Image: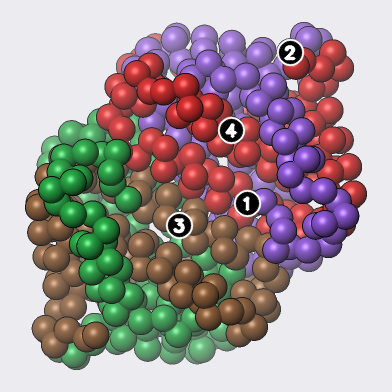
Chain colours: A brown, B green, C red, D purple
Amino acid sequence: MRYSVTDQVQHLAERLRAFARERNWEQFHTPKNLVMAIAGEVGELTQHFQWLSPEESGLVETSVEERQAVAEELADVFIYLVRLADTLGVDLIEQAEEKIAKNEVRYPPDLVKGSAKKMP
Amino acid sequence: MRYSVTDQVQHLAERLRAFARERNWEQFHTPKNLVMAIAGEVGELTQHFQWLSPEESGLVETSVEERQAVAEELADVFIYLVRLADTLGVDLIEQAEEKIAKNEVRYPPDLVKGSAKKMP
Amino acid sequence: MRYSVTDQVQHLAERLRAFARERNWEQFHTPKNLVMAIAGEVGELTQHFQWLSPEESGLVETSVEERQAVAEELADVFIYLVRLADTLGVDLIEQAEEKIAKNEVRYPPDLVKGSAKKMP
Amino acid sequence: MRYSVTDQVQHLAERLRAFARERNWEQFHTPKNLVMAIAGEVGELTQHFQWLSPEESGLVETSVEERQAVAEELADVFIYLVRLADTLGVDLIEQAEEKIAKNEVRYPPDLVKGSAKKMP
């Protein structure tokens, strides 16, 4: 299912806003609590990968069920991230584009090529 | 700065793919490592909020500098999340829309209204 | 149950070393993997507290079951922390005592009293 | 520096309690906030390991400075964990010994030997 709106992240933010309002859950959605919710979901995501070798973590050999479980964890992290950004009035797309632009200047390919020590 | 592409998240994913390729950093961007990078950035985000009360965490009173720092942390989390999803072939927008649809059924407003115990 | 050994953390470390060896799990207990295991357990711990107000988080009103669940999460974090420190040859007690000594000098009571902004 | 007290973790807990009291920081040390502080420190710890291969993460090749930095991150996680346990009235040593005893029963060596899938 794809939404044909111009701004897909904005669509998610509005849907999540309605979701919280209809359940009277806005009271719990303080930025502090949402940051913790992100941390909790990232913890779940981490548990899927903690015992895998870097090669195994490509998931090529794993089951359809495991792939779906990981995709849902990504969605959970993303959902709380969108909700937090909306609560704080931050435009995720704009901030990410600007941050990448910054990193492109900060890490010139010639100077950092292939070195993990130079990574952000 | 707004990108007028239909799929803004896809635009970010492609820009990040080029960013990694030009620096020969693809070798470090295994799913396992990217999950850790997300966890690290979420740790930084958490540190901005850990001593704030829920009310203070709304950031209304904080400085422009602090607002900008938090916005950048959100961008950092988002960037690694987009990169990880791209590496795993997961469509973040689609998965998030589906997960919200699931949650809308799973948490009927009448049954969970105003109760934190019933929250995901 | 209390162990009358001089060094209780060392006792835990040795018990965990034997636990891993008997299951042939030493191969998975690389520092990288153990760091992820800690992050995963901290995520679970976080989920117990994310929707609570700071006051509620004192747990005074919560059930015996919830108290026990939180105590077990603390144990899980501690277990992986002891195992990681043992793997890296780090003495947790010694390092913590030294770090507190450093912080006592770095944060003079008169200068930081009651201010969250001055906290580590 | 070693403390000759019977209970070294208890010694740390008492020292941290005094540290907070002298700075009037007890007001910030709610369990919720301390959980976030642990998550933040674990994020820092994670950043030391995110781009390393599992083999490199053994740290044998890394510098004295990096080893010391990692040891300090472990101390930071441990310090907040001890402080949180003290605030909640949880005995870390006792809970960890009990949890290991549980795991010894739950994961019989013969059934789980060498399999990451069977790991907690």
Q: Distance between the residues labelled 4 and 1?
A: 15 Å
To which chain does the residue with label 2 belong?
D
Q: How far apart are marks 4 and 3 (CA)?
A: 20 Å
The residue labelled by disc 1 is C37
Q: Which of marks 2 and 1 is in front?
A: 1
Q: How far apart are marks 3 and 2 (CA)?
A: 34 Å
Neighbour tally class for label 2: few under 14, some 14-19, many 20 plus, Cα within 10 Å: some
Residue closest to the eye, D78 or C13 = C13
The residue labelled by disc 2 is D7
To which chain does the residue with label 1 belong?
C
The residue most toward the front is B111
Q: Distance between the residues labelled 3 and 1?
A: 12 Å
For the residue marked with disc 4, what is the amino acid? Answer: Glu
The image shows residue B4 at horizontal and vertical percentages of 15, 89
Residues beneath discs 2 and 1 located on the same chain: no
Which type of secondary structure does the marked residue at label 4 adopt? helix
Residues beneath discs 4 and 3 located on the same chain: no
Q: Residue at x 66, y 14 (%)?
A: D10
Q: Is residue D22 above or below residue D12?
A: above
The residue labelled by disc 4 is C72
The numbered mark, 4 or 1, whose residue comes first in the sequence reads 1
For the residue marked with disc 2, what is the amino acid? Answer: Asp
